Amino acid sequence: MNKFTCSVDQVHKDRVEAVRERLEDPETTERMSTLFSTFSDPTRLRILLALQKMELCGCDLCEITGATKSAISHQMRILKIANLVKSRRQGKQVFYSLADQHVVELLKTALEHVKE
Amino acid sequence: MNKFTCSVDQVHKDRVEAVRERLEDPETTERMSTLFSTFSDPTRLRILLALQKMELCGCDLCEITGATKSAISHQMRILKIANLVKSRRQGKQVFYSLADQHVVELLKTALEHVKE
DNA sequence: AATACAGTTGAACAATTGTTCAACTGTTTG
DNA sequence: CAAACAGTTGAACAATTGTTCAACTGTATT
């Protein structure tokens, strides 16, 4: 017997095949899981929720989240790579804002879910 | 100077206050991040996407994801605790299905996002 | 009653990851 | 030009977490 799977002859070969055909491709699921990962960290999530209210600089985000400048900077890098936020420099400060409307929609759907 | 935050006297006390008032409470953000975490694992995500197509037993999920029975079982436990899937036993097998419609909506929104 | 199959459980292990620390760059102000 | 402030960077550390392994439970079949 195969160690990694069950003996499929006995269980729903038809169903497995049908699901396989309709299932999203590996690249898509990989992207989706990465997207969810980005939203799953408490600090990043609060950053996104805060930026949903208004544009904010790094120090504002430190104050709001209670994280250090370094921690915020590391997280903003991840959020920028994920194309979830954009930034603009104004003098000594860097202002961050949400990159697109999809973010808002995902936050809204999740918010509705946790509030039942 | 406070090691954990910046010297706020110099940066947007008004903005920080405004965001603080409108920001979702800690319990809500905690729940949201937990929800996103549950969706962020590739195996769990593919399980959810598969169950979106039809009800499946544990062995079907082994075949579809390529994971062992043990790994699937561990993940199903997490998904059940999170109230994302429900299960029913039929003889030797346990059939799983999505617990509610919110899951579908979240998957749909994320899917739209990654497909641009 | 014995065997086979589906699924569960808990401990151990490896991999990932968020934060901290220290040193750094860039911009403004005195 | 020097000091102060905002932010960046990379290495190190600790915590979390998904998988594996081995032993187990429960159900059906012979």
Image: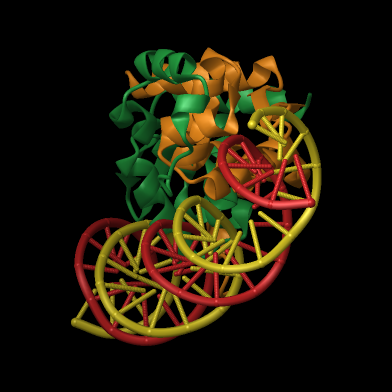
Chain colours: A green, B orange, C red, D yellow
Residue C5 locus on image (x, y percent):
57, 37
Residue nearest the viewer, comparing B47 with B13 = B47
Question: In which quarter of the view is residue A92 placed?
Answer: bottom left
* Left or right of B94 on screen, residue A73: left
- Confirm whether residue B11 shows in the render: no
Residue nearest the viewer, comparing A69 with D22 = D22
Against B19, residue B3 (above or below) is below
Against C11, residue B88 (above or below) is above
Question: In which quarter of the view is residue A116 placed?
Answer: top right
Residue pictured at 46% horizontal, 35% vertical: A7
Residue A106 locus on image (x, y percent):
54, 25
* Left or right of A62 on screen, residue B79: right
Residue nearest the viewer, comparing B54 with D23 = D23
Against C9, residue B94 (above or below) is above
Residue B94 locus on image (x, y percent):
68, 30
Residue pictured at 56% horizontal, 14% vertical: B54
Residue pictured at 30% horizontal, 43% vertical: A81
Residue A97 locus on image (x, y percent):
43, 35
